[in-house]
Image: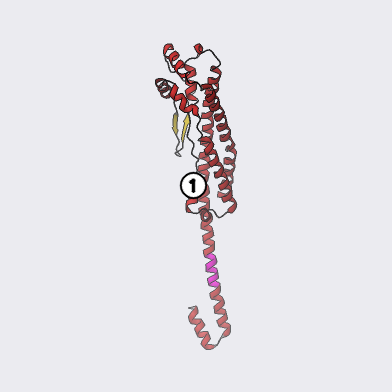
Amino acid sequence: MPIRRISKHLKEQNWFAIWLDLIIVFLAVFIGLQADNWNEERLAKLNAKIYYARLIDDLRAEEVTRLSRITYYEQTLAHGNAALQSLNQSERVLGEKFLVDLYQVSQIWNYTPQRATYDELLSMGIANAIPDVQIRSRLANYYLGLQNSKEIQQERMPFRQNIRRYMPHFVQNFVRENCGDRFESRDDGVILISLPIECDLALGPTVVDEAVVKTLSYSDLEIDLTQSVADLENKVLNLNNYIAPTRELAAHLAELAD
């Protein structure tokens, strides 16, 4: 044992041996501490790579849902533009398609950012899991942007509520049953929504005419519809704006994870 050897050399006043034993002890402690540091650093890098992989999965899910939302809102936007054009026509020629367009333009897909991993990192102390300050800063800026995007996507126009007040309820039911949201569940748990391209309610002409008259009693229809179309255009633009940053961040994390 080092202590016994040092004690023995002290009794013998063998100063060279004492210094040599002390140096050996210091070196052993130093090497042990370095080994612990190296092991902790290795585990920290491994742990960071695990979180990078999970963040990449979230980013890819964000991209997929954004692209799907863009398609969804482009469809509702097309219905809105068609309805606006129809309002310039005589009331007598407004038919079933007009009713479908009015209802479909009011459809929404509630938006929640894909940020489960990032929220977990924040709750546990992100600095411990991801030591790289620049990566933490980039993640913070990205998810701050997603929060701003969420506020834009969650804005609701008066038209959605009002059209459901004026359009006969049975017509709304027909649209929902025949042309409502279609859900797709992916293997990763992401739920995608789409609208059918074609929609046929098969309502009789008399029923359609009466429904059109009741719907047109909505006095601010054109004003609110115009506002709703403009809001949809803004939503689509906002969704598109974050596609490139999402891809770039995922690619950068993939490089770090290699």
Where residue 223 sits in the image (x, y, percent)? 54, 24
Say how the picture is coloured.
secondary structure
From the image, tell me which residue sits under label 1.
117
Q: Is residue 253 magenta?
A: no
Q: Is residue 34 magenta?
A: yes
Q: Residue at x 55, y 66 (%)?
A: 34
Q: Residue at x 51, y 13 (%)?
A: 91
Residue 151 position (above or below residue 127): above
Where residue 188 sits in the image (x, y, percent)? 46, 39
Residue 198 in view in this figure: no
Residue 75 position (above or below residue 45): above
Q: Nearer the viewer, residue 218 or 110?
A: 218
Residue 163 in view in this figure: yes
Q: Which residues are magenta?
A: 27-35
Query: Residue pushed farthest front?
Result: 219
Circle 1: residue type: Thr
Q: Residue at x 48, y 81 (%)?
A: 4
Q: Nearer the viewer, residue 177 or 132?
A: 177
Where residue 79 sits in the image (x, y, percent)? 52, 23
Where residue 162 sits in the image (x, y, percent)? 46, 25
Magenta stretch, main secondary structure class: helix
Element under label 1?
helix
Q: Nearer the viewer, residue 254 or 122?
A: 122
